[in-house]
Amino acid sequence: MTNTVRVTGVSHRYGNATALHEVHIEFPIGVTAVLGPNGAGKSTLLGLLSTALRPQSGSVTVNGVDSARNRKAYRRNLGFLPQGFTLPGNLTVAEFLALTAWQRLVPRGERRAAVDAALRAVDLTHQRDAKISQLSGGMHRRVGIAQAIVNRPGVLLLDEPTVGLDPRQRRGLRDLVSELGVGRTVVLSTHLTEDVAATSDRVVVLDEGTIRFDGTVDELTGGRNKTASEIDAAYELLVTTGDDR
Ligand code: ADP
């Protein structure tokens, strides 16, 4: 299983507005950041990869499984942390993850081990019996990632996972995202170049629904240091619009 996500000729419109225009792209194993200004089409792309949206034209496949024609099988290999994901504060971490494992069709006999493995992966083993409402913001986000990986997906989608965290929590989360990219396809949507510098093997720059760049971080910066400011400078040359600039 290569777990490469293949996006072939995908377009998406909301009424008259084109959010994605004829996108062709592959996401291989490792962390790929999708970087772009507000309105670039990042959430639409992640929505299509997650099956929350259906491609209006073109296709999305993983290991030859089509996201629209074989939705169930496609989703079985997928984990997703949506933007603004909220957690049930009255459950313990382990209760919530056991519930998620059941929802994601993890077989009964494997659920306990799946929850334990997800807790270990996000370094929350000691918080397994804590109420979610008692956790810090950084720990909340880790629980969000744990629910995304509890079914052991080959493909993990993270929509702006560092938003709203303080600098220390962000650093911890970036280390975690890098670890998750070992042997797994991780698609990370972000508008923070620090996220890209710290976590990503590859970067895709999206602007006005079009791919402006697709390659390694070294290729983006022209082989210069893999720092946020070098990535920023290269990115500024690529994007033309965005209401956050
Ligand atoms: P990003 O995540 O990069 O900010 P989006 O995918 O959210 O970009 O949006 C891409 C474009 O599609 C924007 O112009 C946005 O206004 C438009 N758009 C997104 N969602 C909707 C929607 N539900 N209805 C109408 N237009 C939308």
Image (cartoon, rainbow, N blue to C red):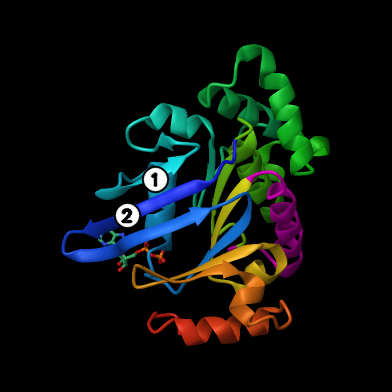
Which residue is rendered at x = 63% and y = 37% of the image?
149
Q: Which residue is mark 1?
A: 60
- Relative to 211, is 162 on the left or the right? right
Which SS type dominates the magenta stretch? helix
**115 vs 242: above or below:** above
Residue 122 screen position, x and y as percent: 74, 44
Q: Residues within 10 Å of mark 1 (few under 14, many from 20)?
A: many
- Mark drawn on residue 10: 2
Q: Quadrant of the N terminus?
A: top right
Which residue is rendered at x = 79% and y = 43% of the image?
123
Residue 229 screen position, x and y as percent: 66, 84
- Tell me whether circle 2 and circle 1 mark residues in contact (CB < 8 Å): yes
Task: Estimate the spatial distance between the alpha carbons at disc 2 and disc 1, rounded to whole Å.
Answer: 8 Å
- Relative to 159, is 43 on the left or the right? left
Q: Quadrant of the C terminus?
A: bottom left
Going by the numbered disc 1, the residue's amino acid type is Val
Which residue is rendered at x = 66% and y = 39% of the image?
146
Reading the chain from its start, which is encountered first: label 2 or label 1?
2
Q: Residues within 10 Å of mark 2 (few under 14, many from 20)?
A: some
* Quadrant of the rendered image holding ligand 1: bottom left
Q: Which residues are magenta?
A: 163-184
Q: Is mark 2 within 8 Å of ligand 1?
A: no
Q: Nearer the viewer, residue 30 or 85?
A: 30
